[in-house]
Amino acid sequence: MAAPLTDAAIEKVRDLIRGGDLEPGQRLPAEAALSAQLGVSRSSLREAVRALATAGVLDVRRGDGTFVTALTPAQLFTGIGEAVDLMGDESLLELMECRRLVEPQVTALAALRCQEADLEEVLRHLQLMEAATDEQDLIAHDADFHAAIAAASRNTALAEILRGISGVTLRARVWRALTEADSSRHTIDEHRAIYDALRDGDAQLAQAAALLHVANVETWMRRALAPKRRRSA
């Protein structure tokens, strides 16, 4: 948790951005001038800048100054994926519940909004999944398959949230559980059902297919983690 003075400095910089005094892409005033303008110490401002840079709000360019980023979802949601890769088993199960809520809706939007090029991209990754013989390739193409669907939804905020809560570590653990349960083939077939619904432009069917897929994956994850949870108990 940041110190109170740093928190105050962070909030004052955020107020400048919210109020339009600092716009996306704009360079911040020199440290001395900005600290005087905000009525905060230079050390507190320095800590505030570090925190906002970590959050994707500011971009510190050595030798060039500090700039407000474009403030896109891709930048502002960057930290989600990094945090996911550090989470323990119980948190991963909670993330699967989040994915169950978000992914079917994103898939339904994609069915309504996707274009021919989007379908070709989704199909390409599906075919690569079907042909994959290496677990790492399978994980990578699975991630790309779902990312292509999210991009086709034309909602970058939802796409970035979904990407964040479906990190590489989570996907690796999911596929490991599916492989051990000899269910990877069935799971790939679920991906095929999602693609078919997208191709047909059927939003309700796409939503249902995605919900079935995520719910099944969540079930396999719970089963795979059950022995470990019992040992912990």
Image (tube, grey):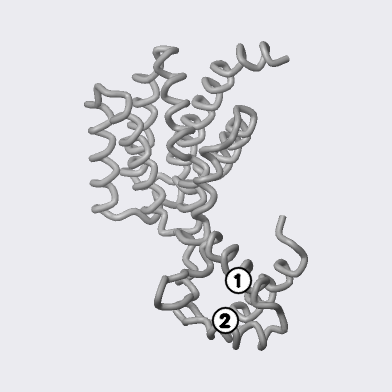
- Is the residue marked by circle 1 packed among few (<14), some (14-19), or many (20+) residues within 10 Å? some
C-beta proximity under 8 Å, tags 2 and 1: yes
Closest to the observer, 213 or 111: 213
Quarter of the image where the C terminus is located: top right
Residue 48, horizontal then vertical, whole percent:
63, 68
Q: Position of residue 139 (x, y in %)?
A: 35, 31
Residue 89, image quadrant: top right
The image shows residue 47, relative to residue 33, as above or below, that is above
Q: Earlier in the sequence, mark 2 or mark 1?
A: 2
Which dot marks residue 31?
Answer: 2
Residue 113: image quadrant is bottom left
Q: Would residue 106 be found to the left or right of residue 89 on screen?
A: left
Q: Residue at x 54, y 29 (%)?
A: 215
Which one is nearer the viewer's eye here, 222 or 109?
222
Q: Nearer the viewer, residue 166 or 136?
A: 136
Q: Is residue 113 above or below residue 124?
A: below
Q: Secondary structure at mark 1?
A: helix
Q: Is residue 1 left or right of residue 148?
A: right
Above or below 33: residue 52: above
Q: How many marks?
A: 2
The residue positioned 61% from the left and 15% from the top of the image is 228
Q: Residue at x 51, y 46 (%)?
A: 82
Identity of the residue furthest to the right in this view: 4
Secondary structure, mark 2, is helix
At x 39%, y 17%, the residue is 179
**Residue 122 % position (x, y):** 29, 43
Q: CA distance from mark 2 to mark 1?
A: 8 Å
Location of residue 216 in the rendering, given as x and y in whole percent from the top left corner:
51, 25
At label 1, the amino acid type is Arg
The relative height of residue 5 versus residue 154 in the rendered view (above or below) is below
Residue matched to label 1: 46
